[in-house]
Image (cartoon, coloured by chain):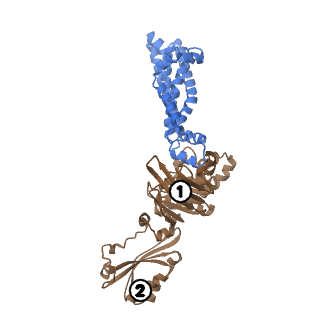
Chain colours: A brown, B blue
């Protein structure tokens, strides 16, 4: 649905906001772009509807290259691309109803058509009883709901979300993200989400691109990126949500690469999807009664509504049995990482 | 207060109101679009045009830097060309309009600058034309501020219209000078000043109320 080819954007002589972005976003996907401030993510999303004219490269939306269009063609193409903003950008002088009607008024639609269009949108975003209010009488979350309804009024195929939840509190953020997710499924809309919060990516995105210094550092499915991040920047973003540090009890303790007297072998396990529900650990304990297993950390979460579990266990016992137990774990549908050996005393001290 | 004085004041008040109202109306018709032009051709705005912006800006500054009393005299030939005469209430309106147009232009420009660019960006993202943005975003959003700014212009016009009395424009200023000052009739002077004060208060009050009613922020 959206293809960016060799996209660059330079301000003046020295500021290179984008340095050759290639990105393909399929129809119906929720695609996240995450980056720190100044990484170029805002410029990137503004290039998709040409609010920023790229210095070079192609912006293909729904099969048409926006960079080669006349002003009039571009205006027509933009009606196909809805956008919502961090600061909502609603008309303070117009009611909720008129704000949502705004894109239709621009197209010269008549009142009857507008009424038929706006009422269902009001109910879609849950603001049916607020039609005659002014934006100043709404909460942040309600304002963003108006923004979403307005963006949908011209039946776009693409919805661009520019830090749409960054000005909202966590609970409101959650409800707005749920709404965007629902709309994506209900209307088969392609959604591009720009954010600096990994939580947003984790909650609604199918795919993600990590942008740093104007280039895409890493991209892939959200599950892939979360379970197997490659770049430092990606790990940094993920670490905000999923601490990769050992439980406090072990942080100071020495980790040995070979077994020592009375040591536990620490394993980090990641379960994904169906396997998160499987009693793998219980199975291991039953199959290898001669090893001892202790659970040090466990957490069950969701990535884009897929169950996602993380666990750190320590095992000790007969060396051969331990190897077999690890083989057993490896046969199952999970990701295993060996952390190292820690003395029993360190484990027991907590 | 004598009947003679009453009729003098009534006539002068009528002339002042006429001069201010008509000048304001004509000046707004030219000044508001001028303000829109000044704003929208600025850097990073929807009709960015450095040449136009700088040229018009320089003309506006030039006219605004001429003191009203000098402007009035300097453009006498032009006034004669437009209204056929350089004296009288109607003739006085020519310099009043010329002085007010750039003033209104700058005031409107200031009001439009207060509209957050995000709103313009949102309208652009919905495929709005520059004209639609001016008509449906910039002007409605800036309207409370424009009303407040234009109130200031009206009050300035009341003051300038008094000066216009010097070239036979009539009005309250003229009355105060000719009767109050030159004929030593302090009661005329005092009455004129009181009327002017009340007038300015009323204009300010009306402007504030309207701006407040329009403001939905």
Q: Where is residue A142 in the image (x, y as percent from the top left)?
A: 53, 54
Does residue B5 appear to the left or right of A233 in the view shown? right
Give the label, 2 or 1, closer to the camera: 1
Q: How crowded is mark 1: few (under 14 residues within 10 Å), some or many (20 or more)?
A: some
Does the image show residue B22? yes
Give the residue at x 54% y 24%.
Answer: B97
- State how far apart marks 2 and 1 are (Cα): 49 Å
Does the image show residue B209? no
Q: Where is residue B209 in the image (x, y as percent from the top left)?
A: 52, 35
- Tag 2 secondary structure: helix
Asked whether A295 or A36 is in front, the reply is A36
Asked whether B58 or B211 is in front, the reply is B58
Q: Position of residue B168 (x, y in %)?
A: 52, 14
Q: Where is residue A10 in the image (x, y as percent from the top left)?
A: 48, 50
For marks 2 and 1 on the same chain, the one whose residue lies earlier in the sequence? 1
Give the label on residue A323, or none: 2
Give the label on residue A211, or none: none
Q: Residues within 10 Å of mark 2 (few under 14, many from 20)?
A: few
Give the residue at x 54% y 35%.
Answer: B37
- Same-subunit check for callouts 2 and 1: yes
Image vertical order of residue A143 relative to residue B33, above or below: below
Residue at label 1?
A: A6
Subunit of label 2:
A
Asked whether B53 or A217 is in front, the reply is A217
Does residue A131 appear to the left or right of B59 in the view shown? right
């Amino acid at each position: 649905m959206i293809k960016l080819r060799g996209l660059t954007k330079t301000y003046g002589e020295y500021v290179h906001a984008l340095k050759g972005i290639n990105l393909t976003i399929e129809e119906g996907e929720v695609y996240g772009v995450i980056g720190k401030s100044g990484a170029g993510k805002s410029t990137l999303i503004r290039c998709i509807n040409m609010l920023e004219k790229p210095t070079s490269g192609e912006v293909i939306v729904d099969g048409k290259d926006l960079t080669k269009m006349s002003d009039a063609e571009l205006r027509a193409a933009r009606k196909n691309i809805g956008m919502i903003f961090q600061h909502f950008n609603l008309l303070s002088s117009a009611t909720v109803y008129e704000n949502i009607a705004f894109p239709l008024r621009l197209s010269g639609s008549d009142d009857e058509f507008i009424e038929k269009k706006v009422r269902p949108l009001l109910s879609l975003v849950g603001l049916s009883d607020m039609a005659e209010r002014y934006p100043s009488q709404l909460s942040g979350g309600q304002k963003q709901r108006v923004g979403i309804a307005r963006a949908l009024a011209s039946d776009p195929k693409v919805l661009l979300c520019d830090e749409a939840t960054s000005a909202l509190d966590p609970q409101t953020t959650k409800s707005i993200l749920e709404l965007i997710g629902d709309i994506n499924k209900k209307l088969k809309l392609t959604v591009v989400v720009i954010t600096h919060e990994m939580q947003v990516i984790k909650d609604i995105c199918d795919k993600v691109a990590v942008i740093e210094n104007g280039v895409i550092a890493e991209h892939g499915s959200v599950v892939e990126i979360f379970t197997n991040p490659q770049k430092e920047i990606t790990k940094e973003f993920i670490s905000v949500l999923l601490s990769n540090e050992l439980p406090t009890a072990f942080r100071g303790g020495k980790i040995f690469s070979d077994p020592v007297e009375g040591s536990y072998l620490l394993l980090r396990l990641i379960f994904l999807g169906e396997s998160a529900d499987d009693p793998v650990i219980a199975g291991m304990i039953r199959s290898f009664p001669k090893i001892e297993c202790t659970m040090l950390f466990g957490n069950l979460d969701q990535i884009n509504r897929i169950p996602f579990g993380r666990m750190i266990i320590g095992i000790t016992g007969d060396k051969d049995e331990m190897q077999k137990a690890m083989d057993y774990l490896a046969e199952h549908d999970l990701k295993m990482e060996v952390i190292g050996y820690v003395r029993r005393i360190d484990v027991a001290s907590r | 207060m004598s009947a003679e004085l009453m009729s003098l004041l009534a006539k002068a008040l009528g002339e002042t109101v006429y001069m201010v109202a008509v000048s304001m109306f004509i000046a707004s018709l030219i000044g508001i679009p001028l303000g829109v032009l000044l704003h929208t051709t600025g850097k990073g705005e929807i009709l960015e045009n450095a040449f136009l912006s700088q040229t018009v800006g320089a003309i506006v500054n030039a006219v605004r830097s001429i003191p009203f009393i000098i402007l009035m005299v300097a453009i006498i030939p032009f006034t004669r060309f437009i209204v056929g005469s350089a004296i009288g209430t109607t003739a006085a309106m020519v310099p009043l309009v010329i002085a007010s147009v750039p003033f209104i232009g700058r005031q409107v420009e200031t009001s439009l600058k207060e509209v957050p660019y995000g709103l313009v960006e949102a309208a652009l993202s919905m495929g709005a034309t520059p004209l639609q943005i001016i008509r449906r975003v910039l002007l409605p959003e800036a309207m409370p501020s424009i009303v407040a700014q234009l109130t200031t212009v009206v009050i300035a016009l009341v003051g300038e219209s008094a000066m216009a009395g010097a070239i036979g424009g009539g009005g309250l200023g003229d009355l105060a000078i000719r009767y109050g000052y030159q004929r030593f009739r302090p009661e005329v002077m005092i009455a004129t000043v009181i009327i002017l004060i009340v007038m300015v208060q009323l204009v300010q009050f009306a402007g504030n109320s309207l701006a407040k009613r329009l403001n939905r922020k």
